[in-house]
Every structure is written in structure tokens, then in C-alpha cells.
Image (tube, grey):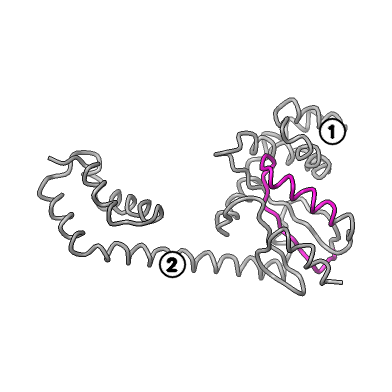
Amino acid sequence: MSTFFDWLGQLFQYLRTFTTIGLLCLVIAWSLPAQAASPIEPQLEQQVLQIIREHPEAILESVQAYQQKQGQKVNQARQTFLQDLKTNPQAVIGESPTTGSAKSKIVLVEFSDFQCPYCAEAYKTLKQLLAKDPDKVTLIYKNLPISSIHAEALPAATAAWSAYQQGKFWEYSDALFTNQKKLGEALYLDTAKNLNLDLAKFKRDLTLATPAIRKDMQLAEKLAVPGTPFFVINSPAFSGVVQLSDIEKILADAK
């Protein structure tokens, strides 16, 4: 008798993408919870396989419909976010760190990870742009620590949030990105000392950072942010997701 995994392997032959495979696993888990925990009944197994052999397009059509629905949901979330960014930027800012001009007509939201090397390069570029045109843009920092590949991303975000509670987020961020290869508890404490932070408060705030960081991550998930760094901009000339390489041009056009 075929095992459940043999049966599952045959099902996968009808699927062409990893997304489809993932969705099929969910379908099987939802529709056959008892069978998934024990061997499949041979008769049921053969019936299901026969249906799939005769109508493989049904699964693919279901997957495509699901993907389309999810895509629509993401597009709607992004449109709502852009509208808020345009009409009520303070709602987008919330309690996030900002820099630049508070009255600027250009608002740039960045989702970033302190251990991401691309984010470190982006930080250098943004720092130069802000120094060149400090009154032109408002930069909003949102946390998206990708802990699955960056072990220090979340601890670094937590430490930066703690520094933010004492008005030193950007100085602290500069130290983290500049010393990215040294991320760790020693760097976090040394940086806090170098910035003359109240260490007792800094350590206490480390335990309070989770809700704020989680809120940023939930927003990133809602917007289907694919990775870091990720930018969303609202300006008189352009509104939407933007590449770092295009930000300088947008700022130049704003002149």
C-alpha cells in the first residue's frame, strides 16, 4: 500500500510552482486532517488520485484564483497605505523614527534590517541625500528584521528602539550600520555608552521594544514587502514603491 508521502509525491507531479505546492499542502491538511495523521485508506487514495488525473486543471485553477485574490488584497492594502501617506502621513509615521523636514511634501518610508548589507549601503546613500537636501524629504524608518537569515537583526532593532526612547535613534543606527560586522550585545552596550545614554533606562527599554517592532513587521506583511531595503515614496511627481536608484532622481525633479 502506498504511504501518504508516496501519494503526496504523485500529486506534486501535477504542480509547476512552489507556491502551488504550498497551497496544495494546505488543501490536504484542511480537507483530510485525520488521514494526514495516519495512513490513507487505499480506496480513498485511489479515488482522489483518479479525480486528479482526470481533472488536474481544477487544482491549478483553484491556485490561480487564490493567487489572484491575494494579489488584489495586497494591491488594496498598498493603495490604502499610499492614500494615508498622502493625506495623513502622521498615521503612517505613528511612533516610528523620522528625520528630515517635518513639513516636506516628499515622504519616504523605508523598511530596513540592521544586519542586511544592502540596507547598510542604502543607509549611506540616504544619509548623503538628506545631507544634500535636508528640507526636501521626510524619512520614516520601519523595522523589518529578517531573523531567518540575520540572527542579530532583531536584537539590533531592539537596541535601536531603546536608543530611540532617548532621542538617539539615528546616531545609534549610524553606529549599527557602520559596525555591521560587529553586531552583538557588546556593540549595543558600547554604543549606548558612547552616546551617553542612561544605561539603566536603555536596558529596561530593551524589554519593551517588541510591540513596536512587531507592528512594523505586520505592516510589512500586509504590504507584501518582499525583502529589505524596501521603499515607498509619496511626492508631487511620483507615488508608490520605488527603487533606491530612483529616489535621487525624484528628489531632483522636485526642484
Indicate which disc residue 68 carries.
none
Report how many numbered discs are placed on residues in the image.
2
Q: Quadrant of residue 109?
A: bottom right
Q: Is residue 128 magenta?
A: yes
Residue at horizontal 16 percent and vertical 41 percent from the top: 2
Indicate which disc residue 69 carries.
2
Q: Quadrant of the C terminus?
A: bottom right
Q: Residues within 10 Å of mark 2 (few under 14, many from 20)?
A: few
Q: Quadrant of residue 154?
A: top right
Q: Earlier in the sequence, mark 1 or mark 2?
A: 2
Q: 26 or 51, which is in the foreground?
A: 51
Residue at horizontal 32 percent and vertical 56 percent from the top: 15
Q: Residues within 10 Å of mark 1 (few under 14, many from 20)?
A: some
Residue at horizontal 69 percent and vertical 47 percent from the top: 118
Q: Is residue 157 above or below residue 84?
A: above
The residues bearing labels 1 and 2 have C-alpha atoms spaced at a distance of 48 Å
Q: Is residue 82 magenta?
A: no
The amino acid marked with disc number 1 is Leu
- Mark 1 or mark 2, which is nearer to you? 2
Q: Position of residue 3 (x, y in %)?
A: 19, 40
Q: Secondary structure at mark 2?
A: helix
Q: Secondary structure at mark 1?
A: loop
Q: Is residue 221 left or right of residue 3?
A: right
Q: Is residue 189 left or right of residue 18?
A: right
> Residue under circle 1?
197
Q: 17 or 108, which is in the foreground?
A: 17
Please give the range of residues in magenta. 103-129
Q: Is residue 2 left or right of residue 239?
A: left
